[in-house]
Amino acid sequence: MTSPNAGTTAEALRASPRLFDNALLDKFSRVHWSMPLFIYTPFVAWLGWLSLRSFSPFAVIALAAVGYAIWTLIEYFGHRYLFHAEFPGKWGARLHFLIHGVHHDHPNDPLRLVMPPLLSGPIMLIALGVALVLFGRPLGYPVLMGFIVGYLAYDMVHYYVHHATPTTRLGRYLRQAHMLHHFRDPESYFGVSAPYWDAIFGTRYAPPEQRRG
């Protein structure tokens, strides 16, 4: 039997509320899922070309794996400690809602499941600066390439688990883990594209009867 509130609930989950009074700023807060691919894939290709001018394919893959691992850690810890932080006061509550609260209130909003360029752009610029400072040229190029690939994987997986019906074992696991985060325990499964960090750091979902304390 279908609940009489099922339609209303489904509509609320996929609603796309206005976040800003300024129409242009509010428009920029929404983005089609494919936009990150169009923006960052050319940079990945360019960094790959620069990397292969200086390193062997095996070295490029190994260094890119380092960048990918760095992204997954930022994804995990950023989601766990920044996105779920509760800031004091009215402005703190507003900031939390803008950063992540709106996604938990309306998790199926199709236009707020990948990072808008206004947010991802500064992250990539900071990553570029850090990569060049820590690794220098040309070592930083494949590391940054892996970092961006990790970010794109995160965005695509996030959209996929909300709007697809996975048929593979991996796809079903990723979707189940993320839905547990949304609808059972928001303090579990912070690694959207890399839930293995939840296993390592002890934040996988556990039923209430299995929890300690």
Image (spheres, rainbow, N blue to C red):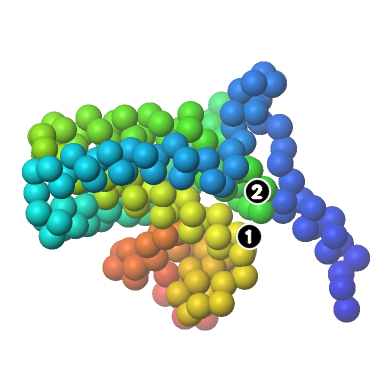
Residue plotted at (20% across, 34% down): 130
Specify few, some or many for label 2: CA neighbours under 10 Å numbering under 14, 14-19, or 20 or more.
some
Give the percent coordinates (x, y) of residue 191: 41, 59
- Under mark 1, the amino acid is His
Residue plotted at (87% across, 73% down): 2
Give the percent coordinates (x, y) of residue 90: 59, 28
Left or right: 172 in relation to 26 = left
Left or right: 127 in relation to 78 = left
Q: What residue is shown with label 1?
A: 163
Quadrant that contains the N terminus: bottom right
Give the percent coordinates (x, y) of residue 62: 15, 58
Along the line of sight, which residue is nearer the eye, 99 or 57? Answer: 57
The answer to whether one can see residue 171 in this image is yes
Number of marks present in the image shown: 2
**Secondary structure state at the residue bearing disc 2:** loop
Specify few, some or many for label 1: CA neighbours under 10 Å numbering under 14, 14-19, or 20 or more.
some
Q: Hey, which quadrant is residue 54 in on the image?
A: top left
Decide: is 75 above or below 117.
Answer: below
Decide: is 79 above or below 133.
Answer: below
Along the line of sight, which residue is nearer the eye, 81 or 170? Answer: 170
Q: Hey, which quadrant is residue 18 in on the image?
A: top right
- Under mark 2, the amino acid is Pro
**Secondary structure state at the residue bearing disc 1:** helix
The answer to whether one can see residue 93 in this image is no
Q: What residue is shown with label 2?
A: 110
Calculate the distance from the C-alpha at mark 1 to the C-alpha at mark 2: 8 Å
Residue plotted at (29% across, 68% down): 200
Q: Hey, which quadrant is residue 197 in on the image?
A: bottom left
Among numbered discs 1 and 2, the one appearing first in the sequence: 2
Along the line of sight, which residue is nearer the eye, 47 or 166? Answer: 47
Q: Are marks 1 and 2 in contact (CB under 8 Å)?
A: yes
